[in-house]
Amino acid sequence: MKAYLLIILALLASPAAFAEKTLQECIDTENDLERLVCYDGIFGINKNADSYNSIESNNFTLPNNNDSFGKEQSNKEVSEISSTAKGVYKKWKNGTIVFLQNGQEWKIIGVQRIHYPTENPKVVITKGIFGSFDLKVEGLNRRFKVKRIK
């Protein structure tokens, strides 16, 4: 029984020691590109050589901050956007789609229902807690939970 336990412990400990050694080697690598390739190797990320070359030669572009606001993978520093909602809105309720002048589309997902007829209102969308977004309509003292759909 003890022999089995020793074998299991040896098998569990060896990959951890190997990974730690490899991780330390990556940390000690001075070239940024080689260090990135080393980390990718540890975590099993397979990148083609072209993607590394574009990083090395700085041939990459960052997206417009406003364009990526509200998308799932967005980690930008933009905390709010202001725009004009195109069209006539009579009720602000769950399922209402708000078309912004900048081309974005947001869907109200909250349960509030407000009768506030307006045409082309100015709106502000801010980041809420836990990755949510709030829509504030000019002239209305309420906020709606929204989700970006386009």
Image (spheres, rainbow, N blue to C red):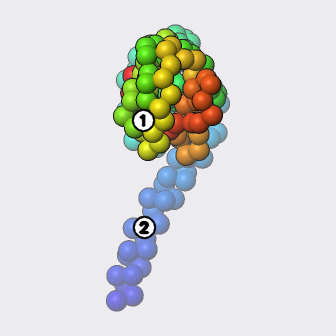
Q: As drawn, which residue projects farthest toward the bottom?
A: 1
Crowd band around label 2 with a 10 angstrom C-alpha radius: few (<14), some (14–19), many (20+)? few
Report x, y in % for residue 5: 39, 81
Residue 20 vertical position relative to residue 100 in the rendered view, above or below: below
- Which residue, given by chain and number where applicable, does mark 2 sit on? 12
Residue 116 in the figure: left or right of residue 124: left
The amino acid type of the residue labelled 1 equals Lys
Q: Nearer the viewer, mark 1 or mark 2?
A: 1
In front of the other: 56 or 117? 117
Q: How many labels were placed on the picture?
A: 2
Crowd band around label 1 with a 10 angstrom C-alpha radius: few (<14), some (14–19), many (20+)? some
Residue 93: quarter of image: top left
Residue 38 vertical position relative to residue 139 in the rendered view, above or below: below
In front of the other: 150 or 97? 97
The disc at residue 13 is none
Q: Residue at x 44, y 44 (%)?
A: 111
Residue 29 vertical position relative to residue 63 in the rendered view, above or below: below
Residue 75: quarter of image: top right
Report x, y in % for residue 138: 61, 23
Q: Residue at x 47, y 42 (%)?
A: 112
- Which residue, given by chain and number where applicable, does mark 1 sit on? 93
CA gap, disc 1 and disc 2? 55 Å
Report x, y in % for residue 88: 43, 16
Q: Residue at x 59, y 36 (%)?
A: 142
Task: Tell me which label, 1 or 2, sits earlier in the chain.
Answer: 2
